[in-house]
């Protein structure tokens, strides 16, 4: 049975990591199931994805410590490779991915959230990179993405102390965009995803590409990339529809994803 469930609600895909007995910890099977779930998403239909965890306690409580504890060097490398493939798949997934963090997001769980475009959480969420207490460094990009997502100093504090931060602090330091009462988290995530999905899909994709790729460039190269992606929009039906609707004062813009 798969440890990851997928459903589409209109233009929104919902990926749920479903291993609540182990607080959705990431073992090799979960990682492979996650890859398969994202590979299976129909990008003609889906314009935004929500990633969440099953149960009321955890988004993901980390990489599976039990599985990692007995790994050989080769197995450790293979595990890291699969994990990094999943995280990069999400980070570079053509449409935005929203992490709806419904509890613990520790170690690999915090890193998984960091690979998503937008993070929102429930009021019981807890974030942290406790790896140094286990004798390891973060291995799924935590040292890189956390320091890019929040201040370098705060990221270092979290990485060196292993101390976790609760939802209100995560909001204050910019790790999440908003905090919801737990029962309202998925509704909030859905509203956000639907708002994104109503916009011109190709333009949204180009924004994701411009931000992600531009962050690795100097400003001049980033601006050149933006110009190129902006130009590409003028070859789309959606650009014509969006601008015609405005000029004709027409409501109900119909973007066709083309
Ligand atoms: N792995 C495996 N099982 C886990 C788990 C985890 N990370 N977290 C929780 N569980 C399991 C528990 O063992 C327990 O299972 P049973 O004993 O019932 O069979 C069940 O989930 C419920 O957990 P608790 O009984 O502990 O629940 P509590 O409410 O008391 O505590 C907790 C919740 C989240 C505070 C606690 O479970 C906890 O501290 N969990 C571990 C959190 C953690 O340290 N996470 C970071 C893991 S290290 C790398 C790649 C990746 C990584 C590193 C390198 N390379 C490629 C180089 C990533 C490392 C990590 O993520």
Image (cartoon, rainbow, N blue to C red):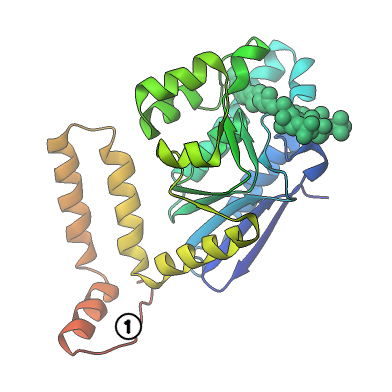
Q: Position of residue 165 (x, y in %)?
A: 54, 31
Q: Position of residue 158 (x, y in %)?
A: 50, 22
Residue 65, relative to residue 120: is it above or below?
above
Q: Residue furthest left?
A: 220
Tell me the element at label 1: loop
Asked whether the viewer can see residue 130, the reply is yes
Which residue is tagged 1?
A: 253
Number of residues whose C-alpha sits closer than 10 Å to that of mark 1, classed few (under 14), some (14–19) or many (20 or more): some
Q: For this view, does 35 lie left or right of residue 3?
A: left
Q: Position of residue 189 (x, y in %)?
A: 53, 60
The front one of 26 and 37 is 26
Q: For this view, does 189 lie left or right of residue 183?
A: left
Quadrant in the rendering for residue 242: bottom left
The front one of 63 and 258 is 63
Q: For this view, does 189 lie left or right of residue 226?
A: right
Residue 129, relative to residue 160: is it above or below?
below
Find ligand 1 in the image and state its quadrant: top right
> At 14% across and 44% down in the image, what residue appears?
224
């Amino acid at each position: 049975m798969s440890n990851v469930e997928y459903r589409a609600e209109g233009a929104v895909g919902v990926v749920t990591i479903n291993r609540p007995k182990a607080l959705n910890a990431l073992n090799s099977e979960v990682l492979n199931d996650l890859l398969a779930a994202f590979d299976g998403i129909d990008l003609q239909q889906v314009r935004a994805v929500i990633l969440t965890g099953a149960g009321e306690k955890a988004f993901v409580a980390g990489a599976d410590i039990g599985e990692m504890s007995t790994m050989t060097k080769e197995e450790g490398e293979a595990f890291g490779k699969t994990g990094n493939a999943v995280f990069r798949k999400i980070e570079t997934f053509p449409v935005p991915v929203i992490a709806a963090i419904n509890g613990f997001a520790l170690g690999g769980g915090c890193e998984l959230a960091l690979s998503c475009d937008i993070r929102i959480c429930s009021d019981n969420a807890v974030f942290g990179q406790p790896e140094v207490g286990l004798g390891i460094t973060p291995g799924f990009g935590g040292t890189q993405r956390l320091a890019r997502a929040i201040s370098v100093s705060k990221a270092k504090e979290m990485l060196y102390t292993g101390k976790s931060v609760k939802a209100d602090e995560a909001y204050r330091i910019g790790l999440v965009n908003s905090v919801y009462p737990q029962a309202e988290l998925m509704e909030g995530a859905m509203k956000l995803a639907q708002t994104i999905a109503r916009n011109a899909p190709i333009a949204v994709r180009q924004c994701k590409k411009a931000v992600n790729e531009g962050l690795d460039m100097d400003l001049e190269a980033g601006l050149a990339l933006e110009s190129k992606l902006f130009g590409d929009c003028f070859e789309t039906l959606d650009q014509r529809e969006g601008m015609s609707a405005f000029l004709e004062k027409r409501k109900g813009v119909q973007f066709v994803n083309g």
